Image: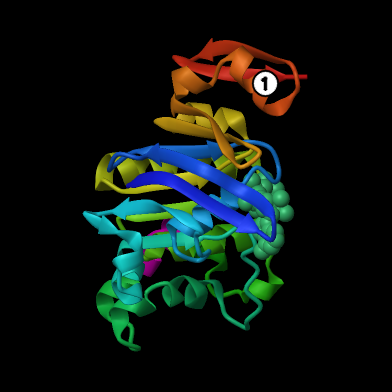
Amino acid sequence: MLIQQLTKHYGTKRVVDEVSFEIPKGKVLSLIGPNGAGKSTVMGMISRLVAKDAGLVHFEGKDLAQWNSRDLSKRLAILTQSNNIQMKLTVRELVSFGRFPYSQGRLQEEDRQKADEALAYMELEAIADQFIDELSGGQRQRAMIAMVIAQDTDYILLDEPTNNLDIYHASNMMKIVRRLCDELGKTVILVLHEINYAAFYSDYICAFVNGRVAQFGTVEDVITKENLSAIYGVDFEIQQVAGRPLSIYY
Ligand SMILES: Nc1ncnc2c1ncn2[C@@H]1O[C@H](COP(=O)(O)OP(=O)(O)OP(=O)(O)O)[C@@H](O)[C@H]1O
Ligand SMILES: [Mg+2]
């Protein structure tokens, strides 16, 4: 997926300003940067939930704008940041719900299998028959992620998937993202505030500041003391841990 000069205004405010980056197939890209930097708006535009004002998204050989919605939903799935579905659904029903673009209104064996796989990935089997409005915040977040994974699309976009997750479930989620890429060839774009998850589990990082790309490159290119201090306005130290540049901030 190639993104060129993507731009979005709200009123007179330019919230995304000529943003360009590329993600090769089968890789993990994390978008980082301060609140309000434009990350979710970019995610919205590259999934067509938000209309762009200018720029281009090349997706699988054609302009994203030319995709038929149903075909697009079979290739690309997104978990948005405000993902609070209020419906009397069980976890299993919610996760199966992700299969509807494929199932012509009636779940087939394959749909059930994909839903069960996603429930297992997110370790939700024990609560699969509970209603989603009766779950904790982190359990609900995991159910939402499972719904997106169950869609089994080539491209998976997750806006702040680690929100509300404890350390165990957050790192489990990141490991699953890695497996989806490394074993199944999926392409994953994440928005993360946990820079160390981004550094440890991504291939590429795009850092946003004020609607613009401040840095784009490999983890090693972007995760430096100087870059992070400039992006976030706090002091950072970087240590190599397991071959990755991990950050401490204060
Ligand atoms: N629908 C909207 N109408 C008006 N302004 C909007 C709208 N959506 C976003 N904005 C503005 O666009 C800017 C970027 O918002 P965006 O949600 O993309 O930021 P973000 O980088 O995802 O931040 P966060 O880390 O807080 O999620 C913000 O200033 C926000 O107020
Ligand atoms: Mg956001």
What secondary structure predominates along the stretch shown in magenta? Answer: helix
x, y percent for residue 190: 50, 45
Please name the residue shown 70% across and 46% down the image.
36
Q: Amino acid at mark 1?
A: Ala
Left or right of 236 in this view: 5? left
The magenta segment is 114-122
Q: Nearer the viewer, residue 192 or 106?
A: 192
Q: Element under label 1?
A: helix
The quadrant where residue 59 appears: bottom left
Please tell me how crowded label 1 is: few (under 14), some (14-19), or many (20+) other residues with Cα within 10 Å.
Answer: some
Say left or right for 232 vs 116: right
Q: Position of residue 76 (x, y in %)?
A: 36, 61
Which residue is nearer to you in this view: 141 or 187? Answer: 187
Q: Is residue 198 left or right of residue 166?
A: left
Q: Is residue 33 magenta?
A: no
**Residue 145 drawn at (x, y percent):** 51, 58
Q: Quadrant of residue 209?
A: top right
Q: Which residue is mark 1?
A: 230
Compared with residue 26, is residue 143 higher up or lower down, i.e. above or below?
Answer: below
Residue 152 visible in the picture = no
